[in-house]
Image (spheres, grey):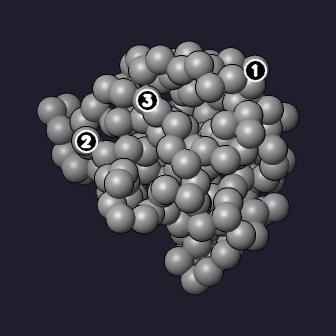
Amino acid sequence: MNREIELRSQLAAYRAADGRETAYLARMKELCDSVAKPCARSTYTPGHFTASAFVLSPERDALLLILHGKLGLWLQPGGHVDDEDVSLLEAARREVCEEVGLRELQLLEPVPLDVDIHDIPAREGEPAHQHFDVRFLFRAPTRAVQAGSDAKDARWVSLAELGNDGLVRSDESVLRAVRKLRA
């Protein structure tokens, strides 16, 4: 199965939690149908798919977050889909390995945990565009991590701590996923 067919299958299986996700899902399906290479980093109008991973600790009580080098926020590992990636799921696994060194992640759900569309500002050589992020849920085999790639730092954050008292500066999409994990 090719990457785009698998992506369509994953989007078809995904159940939106609310109106915002329903709108994201519709836009993602539209992107699949409207461009030849929806995962290509060079697709800027309106944007392209990315893949990320919500990684739970072995005990499932903490979430792995990285301090994103460009955004200065604590986010889940993730990024662009490379030509060599056979699927978005494998792109998410690769990004975790590159950003924190974790391998042999256990996939906890066959369908994505979350979907999100977010704006990316213009930078040298790239116009403003959007990332259509498909997010998978994994369990780590160990808590041993080391920041690398786009990560300035990496840490495990208690699920109970996330979103309380502003202890970790993140964004609403991460907190939305945390609410799903708590439910």
Residue for badge 2: 72
Residue 10 appears in view: yes
**For the residues marked 2 and 3, what is the alpha-carbon distance in whole angstroms?**
12 Å
Find residue 178 and report its horizontal and vertical position in percent.
58, 60
**Front: mark 3 or 1:** 3
Q: In percent of the image, x 43 and y 50: which residue is there?
A: 131
Residue nearest the viewer, comparing 150 with 164: 164
Residue nearest the viewer, comparing 119 with 176: 176
Amino acid identity at mark 3 = Ala
Q: Name above or below for residue 114 compared with residue 128.
A: below
Residue for badge 3: 154
Residue for badge 1: 104
Amino acid identity at mark 2 = Gly
Mark 1 Cα within 10 Å, few/some/many (few <14, many 20+)? few
Residue nearest the viewer, comparing 120 with 78: 78
Query: Can you say which quadrant of the picture contains the N terminus?
Result: top right
Q: Given contact means CB atoms under 8 Å apart, are the residues at marks 2 and 3 in contact?
A: no
Q: Is residue 9 left or right of residue 54?
A: right
Q: In percent of the image, x 73 and y 34: which residue is there?
A: 58
**For the residues marked 1 and 2, what is the alpha-carbon distance in whole angstroms?**
28 Å
